[in-house]
Amino acid sequence: MFYSSAKMKETFLRNSDITFINKRFTVNRFKKPLMFIFVVTNTGQSAMVAMALYEKEETSFFARV
């Protein structure tokens, strides 16, 4: 499952030079890895631009996505 609001997409389009992923939240009630995608804005602030709850942490899974 992937979510990114219209404002998040707009932020990404304006500030996609530096993008980083935080997957610290690997334990949740769904027992699936949760990933947050951030960018660094032109003012040096980080802004979340997407979040994803994905099935597996395996290369073969991401090759299908």
Image (spheres, helix red, strand yellow):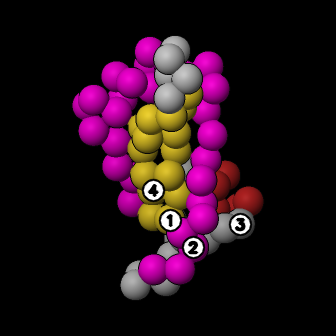
Q: How far apart are marks 2 and 4 (CA)?
A: 11 Å
What type is the residue that disc 4 sits on?
A: Ala
Q: Can residue 62 be seen in this view?
A: yes
Q: How far apart are marks 1 and 3 (CA)?
A: 14 Å
What type is the residue that disc 2 sits on?
A: Thr
Count residues near mark 1 (Cα–Cα under 10 Å), then give few for <14, some for 14-19, many for 20+: many
**On the image, numbered disc 2 is attached to which residue?**
26
Q: Residue 52 carries which label?
A: 4
Q: Are marks 3 and 2 in contact (CB under 8 Å)?
A: no
Q: Is residue 64 visible?
A: no
What type is the residue that disc 3 sits on?
A: Glu
**27 falls in the magenta region:** yes
Q: How far apart are marks 4 and 3 (CA)?
A: 15 Å
Which residue corresponds to the image point at 52% horizontal and 15% vertical from the top-left? 42
Indicate the secondary structure of the residue bearing disc 3: loop
Which of the marked residues, 3 or 2, is nearer the chain's N terminus?
A: 2
Which residue corresponds to the image point at 53% horizontal and 80% vertical from the top-left? 27
Q: Where is residue 1 in the image (x, y as percent from the top left)?
A: 39, 60
Q: What segment is highlighted magenta in the picture?
A: 1-28
Q: Residue 34 carries which label?
A: 1
